């Protein structure tokens, strides 16, 4: 899927703008949407370039306010792909804009795994080890070398990742338009996106029952039997309940307060 096409002067300028704006990714991290606001800001250079009226720009910004979370160092690759999709959406009235968020969600999990392993699990440890050994000897090169060893690869990956993502997304769009497989891409991206959201739900939503039934001299923990019948049943049911409240129009902040109240009350009466 490599693309040796050189970027135009305008595209290079756009990549630089996306590179700098990507540093806002975690500027407003929150538990409701995580990095969504930062990602939306990172997309602003592309949005203001491709959409000329305020309504379309507002819709695009709002579109990128859906929950998002990945390793910051590799986010520009996803931003680059999303930029190519936004370009297609601005030029093609029949383009299904839902695919943009589906592709984002499908990419954020794998890239988070790669980014965490590469930067947090490998490069950071090596940079700290080298920098710390020099710092213990009283050398000023310790912290300087640490910052260089970590951030030089980081900056290169962050910038050229955006270029790669943009070229990759553009080529995918060209092939899709020429072969007529856009609907398959949309369906596949939707499936992957739902799988990622399902995996996030299973790993991030925790709910267990502390009820213990006593029959004679035997104590029966309810949670043990629930796990045997249907592992993670309670987190699933509560997630469905939260989704139901959202569909009914309840605000996420209200749902968060309800969750806190249920947790406190349930703990006090001994059921969770």
Image (cartoon, helix red, strand yellow):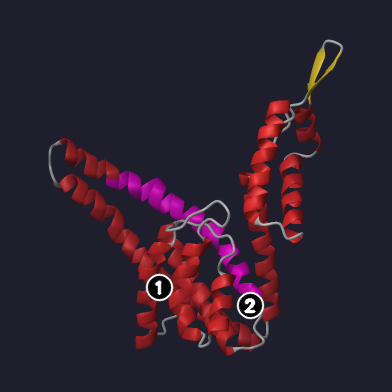
Which residue is found at the position 57% from the left and 89% from the top? 91
Which residue is found at the position 64% from the left and 41% from the top? 260
Q: Which residue is denoted by mark 1 in the rendering?
A: 18
Q: Position of residue 76 (x, y in %)?
A: 44, 67
Q: Which residue is denoted by mark 2 in the rendering?
A: 97
Which residue is found at the position 79% from the left and 39% from the top? 230
Q: Are the residues tagged 1 and 2 within 8 Å (C-beta)?
A: no
Note whether 132 is above or below 49 in the view shown: above
Crowd tier of the residue under label 1, counting other residues whose Cα lies within 10 Å: few below 14, some 14–19, many 20 or above: many
Residue toward you, 27 or 206: 27
Residue toward you, 4 or 188: 188
Circle 1: element type = helix
State the predominant SS element of the stretch in magenta.
helix
Q: Quadrant of residue 203?
A: top right
Q: Position of residue 49 (x, y in %)?
A: 45, 84
Q: Earlier in the sequence, mark 1 or mark 2?
A: 1
Crowd tier of the residue under label 2, counting other residues whose Cα lies within 10 Å: few below 14, some 14–19, many 20 or above: some
Is residue 84 located in the magenta-colored stretch of the structure? Answer: no
Q: What segment carries the magenta color?
A: 98-127
Residue toward you, 206 or 136: 206
- Identify the residue at the far right of this view: 216
Q: Position of residue 43 (x, y in %)?
A: 47, 73
Which residue is found at the position 67% from the left and 50% from the top? 255
């Amino acid at each position: 899927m490599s693309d040796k096409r050189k970027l135009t002067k305008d595209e290079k300028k756009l990549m630089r703008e996306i590179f700098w704006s990507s540093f806002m990714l975690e500027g407003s991290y929150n538990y409701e949407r995580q990095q969504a606001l930062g990602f939306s800001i990172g997309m602003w250079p592309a949005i203001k370039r491709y959409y000329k009226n305020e309504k379309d720009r507002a819709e695009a910004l709002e579109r990128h306010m859906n929950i998002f979370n990945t390793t910051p160092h590799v986010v520009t690759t996803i931003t680059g792909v999303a930029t190519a999709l936004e370009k297609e959406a601005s030029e093609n009235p029949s383009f299904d804009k839902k695919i943009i968020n589906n592709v984002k969600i499908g990419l954020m999990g794998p890239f988070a795994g790669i980014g965490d392993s590469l930067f947090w699990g490998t490069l950071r440890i090596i940079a700290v080890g080298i920098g710390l050994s020099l710092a213990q000897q009283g050398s000023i090169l310790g912290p300087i070398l640490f910052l260089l060893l970590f951030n030089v690869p980081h900056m290169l990956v962050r910038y050229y990742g955006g270029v790669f993502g943009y070229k990759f997304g553009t080529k995918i769009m060209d092939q899709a338009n020429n072969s007529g497989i856009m609907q398959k891409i949309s369906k596949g991206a939707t499936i992957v996106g739902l799988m990622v959201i399902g995996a996030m739900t299973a790993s991030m939503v925790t709910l267990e029952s502390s009820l213990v039934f006593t029959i004679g001299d035997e104590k029966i923990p309810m949670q043990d039997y629930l796990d045997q019948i249907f592992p993670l049943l309670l987190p699933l049911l509560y997630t469905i309940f939260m989704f139901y409240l959202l569909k009914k129009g309840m605000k996420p902040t209200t749902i968060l307060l309800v969750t806190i109240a249920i947790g406190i009350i349930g703990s006090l009466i001994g059921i969770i």
